[in-house]
Amino acid sequence: MDDSKTFNLNVRKDFPILSKKILEKKDLIYFDTAASAQKPNTVINETNDFYKNHYSNVSRGVHTLSVESTFRYEDARKKVQKFLNARSENEIIFTKSATEGINLVAQTFYEKFMQKGDEVILSLIEHHSNLIPWFFLRDKYGVALKFANIQPSGEIDIDHFESLFTNKTKIVSLTHLSNVFGTELNEKAISICKDKNVPILLDGCQSAAHLKIDVQKLGCDFFVFSGHKTYGPAGIGVLYGTENLLSEMPPYQGGGGMIGDVSLEGASYAELPAKYEAGTPPLVEAHGLGIAIDYMNKIGLDNIIEHENEITKYAFNKLNEIDFIKIHGGDNKRNSIISFNIKNVHSHEVSSFLDVEGIAIRAGHHCCQPLMKHLGVNSTARLSFGVYNSLEEVDKLVIALHKCKEFFNK
Amino acid sequence: MNDLINDLYQEIILDHGREPRNFGKCEPHNKSADGHNPLCGDNLKLTFLLNDQNIIEDIKFTGEGCAISLASASLMTEKLKGKKIEVAEEIFKDFTNLVSGSDEDLKVLNEEDSLYALKGVGRFPMRVKCATMAWHAFNQALKD
């Protein structure tokens, strides 16, 4: 048995859901990690344990359970800080989702730094969650939005991107790893922002568990990701922001936990990071995310990345050989995601067909309708890989895809 | 081949999915509505002509979608053409019950109906919306 196979078998034991049988007693093959990752035993057990043995509200009481909960919540923040290599825990804001993180930045950054007529640069490949929060600024405040084109490879057209800057450009927001193409952002995009002194937000939903993230090395000003795509619970997200910007921007929501002092005449606000965490936070979920980070560290991000790259390359080559399959994007800098269409078969049919074979894939527009229009398709089928997938599963998929094509073209 | 898949994709569904009947725009028409499935991006435009006896004289649709949504729209237009509006409404109710997995208490549809071919959708809850998109558009057009 070779190393990669042993690695994979060991990892698979950590994910109880992989022993589930689908519909007609088929083994589950989970190729939908980009939508949400499965959870390892440690995350399931530790969140359970939190409720059973330590649960209370955080940062409010002085009793034992309050201390235990607060410790776990703040410990999770430390783990996230190390995971992203942020300078300080003050730069880690817990949100309910990556989406909330983007909305937070769009609203509060506008309030502090922008006015009518100012510009935001986005791109054609953005997820709706990195479009609509900015649409709000356009609709409510008259902010102008500009969209960078993409190349056939699925990468942003850097020259076009650069040409969009004017002296009114106030912020840039781009996906770090495309949820349709699996392509990583060209780091030139970030250096261009640095040169022009324009802050950049990276949507790291697809990159956080599949690339090594170092926000200082990347040089981004904001970075968001979600817990559930990184083997942790849903309901928890992370916003990283530089302390400078987060200090200057106003609070997002008002409520308990984010105040300094309140009288009926007004209020002062808490220091970072509490300033942006109004209300009782998703504390158990934050703890679960911390445990998921422990889990990834235990396996080693390098090992995860190497394993996923091997599968992605293998699947890309296998699918690329099949004449009735069209893969969207190229193979340069592709990571863990492959979108494709089968000639004359709608992606829904592909997904339902694969479902009864036990194979879970995503079919649809992947919350990227502008990109679908650009590609000239109504929807695509998408494979996405996680630490638990294997080359054997890809072989089973290829057989099923041939059967699928045959069935719908009989 | 798997029974579930054969039930879902009966020959008549594949046939209507590939070659939808009554595909186009009904001219003249006095009723229309758009169907849209925001989860997947499938969409259709339904047009029909309701005459002064409340009979659907002609009905057509255009759009893009999966085999289930196209076949359902196609079979719907075949079924509803020439029907009185009261009957059409009963068919709508029966059909939504049928694809939600309950074929008891059907008032007008029976196993002889071609629409019965869509019963297999009931086993795929995420596909029910594909099958009902055209029908909800029809229902919407009646209300407008």
Image (cartoon, rainbow, N blue to C red):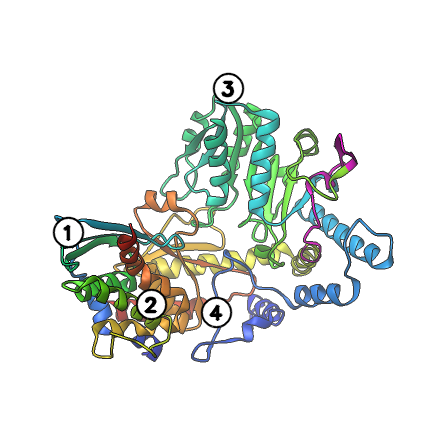
Q: Look at the picture and state if A277 lies above or below A27.
A: above
Residue position marked by numbered label 2 in the rendering: B96
Q: Is residue A141 left or right of residue A104?
A: left
Residue kind at label 3, given as amino acid type: Asn
- Numbered tag placed on residue A231 in the rendering: none
The amino acid type found where label 4 is placed reads Ile
Kindly identify which chain the residue marked by label 2 belongs to.
B
Q: Residue at x 20, y 79 (%)?
A: B112
Q: Would you call the spot at circle 4 few (<14 residues within 10 Å), some (14-19), or many (20 or more)?
A: many
Residue A376: x and y, percent? 30, 46
Nearer-the-camera pick, B119 or A394: B119
Magenta segment range? A260-285
Task: Please report whichever mark, 4 or 3, sits nearer to the chain's N-terminal start.
Answer: 4
The CA distance from mark 2 to mark 3 is 56 Å
Q: Nearer the viewer, residue B108 or A97?
A: B108
Mark toward the viewer: 2 or 3: 2
Disc 4 to disc 3, how far (Cα)?
A: 50 Å
Q: Chain of mark 1?
A: B
Evaluate whether label 4 is on the same chain as label 1.
Answer: no
Looking at the image, the residue that sits furthest to the top is A167
Residue matched to label 3: A167
Q: For the residue marked with disc 2, what is the amino acid?
A: Thr
User: Residue A330's x, y, as percent?
Assistant: 39, 48
Query: What chain letter is assigned to the residue under label 4?
Result: A
Residue that carries the numbered disc 1 in the rendered image? B26
Closer to viewer: mark 4 or mark 1:
1
Q: CA distance from mark 1 to mark 3?
A: 52 Å
Q: Amino acid at mark 1?
A: Cys
Q: Disc 3 is attached to a residue of which chain?
A: A
Mark 3: secondary structure: loop
Of tags 2 and 4, the one toward the viewer is 2
